[in-house]
Image (cartoon, rainbow, N blue to C red):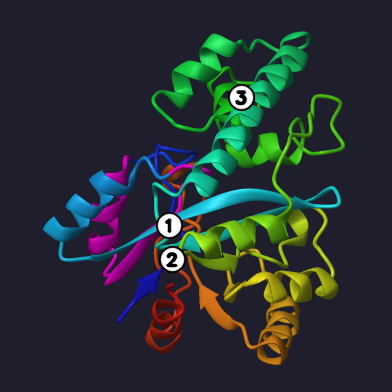
Amino acid sequence: MRIDLHTHSTVSDGTGAPAQVMREAAEAGLDVVALTDHDSVDGWDAAAAAAERHSVDFVPGIEVSCRHRGTSIHLLSYWHRRDDEGVEAMLQVTRDARIHRAREIVERLSADYPISWDSVAQIAGSAATVGRPHIADALVAQGVVPTRDAAFESLLVPRSPYYVPHYAPEVKDAVRTMRAAGGVPVFAHPGAGKRGRIVTTSVIEGMARAGLVGLEIDHRDHDDEQRVRLERIAIRLGLVRTGASDYHGTGKPNRLGENVTSPEVFGRLQEARA
């Protein structure tokens, strides 16, 4: 059984619609797939219907943008109740903050580069969340940078004069909110240092006390040293080790199923559902 628990669609910053992601997952030989769009569950219904058509077991999920003392943290959650008031309130604040931040970044960039909010909005389309990936794609479309990754390595990095920070919930609060909604939270790519600062072990310990269930250890942004370090932390704290592609379609080089979660660990995640 091949299990990929981290994918994105056009609901956030992926390039394929939810149904397309499920079709591509089946073509890649996956048996279980989670759709984890940023701060939105709008793709669940379409993904679930397509997964059934393609004989793929669908896991409803999300990736929540969080923070701890200024450090960005992404939290995956699976199977939480989509109509939970606490979750929806948290996500609405985050989505609103993303829009304001994206507009300010575009305003700063437009002083030096041929980019406008209309061009970003056109690329984002019906996405429930608008963020830096859409701005990056607009910069690519205008020939400012060759790829999305190039935009993130230059104009959109935190040290860039065009960068704008944004609100995000404190990660331990987000873990508690998801657990209260019946969700199973997993820390996404916790050792991805090339994305920016990573949190210390003590922060992971605090997240575990708040209800964290797992660490996404097998991820393309983790080298062997990070995987060994994170595995030791997971064993000591009783957290499960997950793996996933973090698939974004053509927006990133990540390929479906390039990292997977074991059936045993998936069973433990299911057992953790409230």
Which residue, given by chain and number where applicable, does mark 2 sit on? 5
Which type of secondary structure does the marked residue at label 2 adopt? loop
Decide: few, some or many residues near mark 3? Use Cα within 10 Å; few <14, some 14-19, many ≥20. some
Quarter of the view holding residue 31: bottom left
Q: Which residue is mark 1?
A: 61
User: What is the CA distance from the residue labelled 3 to the residue labelled 2?
Assistant: 27 Å
Q: Which residue is mark 3?
A: 99
Which secondary structure lies at badge 3?
Answer: helix
- Magenta stretch containing residue 29, yes or no? yes
Give the residue displayed 39% in from the left and 26% down from the top: 126
Residue 120: x and y in percent read 54, 19
Q: Is residue 116 magenta?
A: no
* First to last magenta residue range: 17-40
Give the CA separation, mark 2 to mark 1: 8 Å
Which residue occupies 51% across, 73% down?
243
Which kind of residue does numbered mark 3 sit on?
Answer: Ile
Graded by Cα atoms within 10 Å as few (under 14), some (14 to 19) or many (20 or more), the crowding at tag 2 reads many
Residue 112 in the image: state x and y as whole percent. Answer: 78, 11
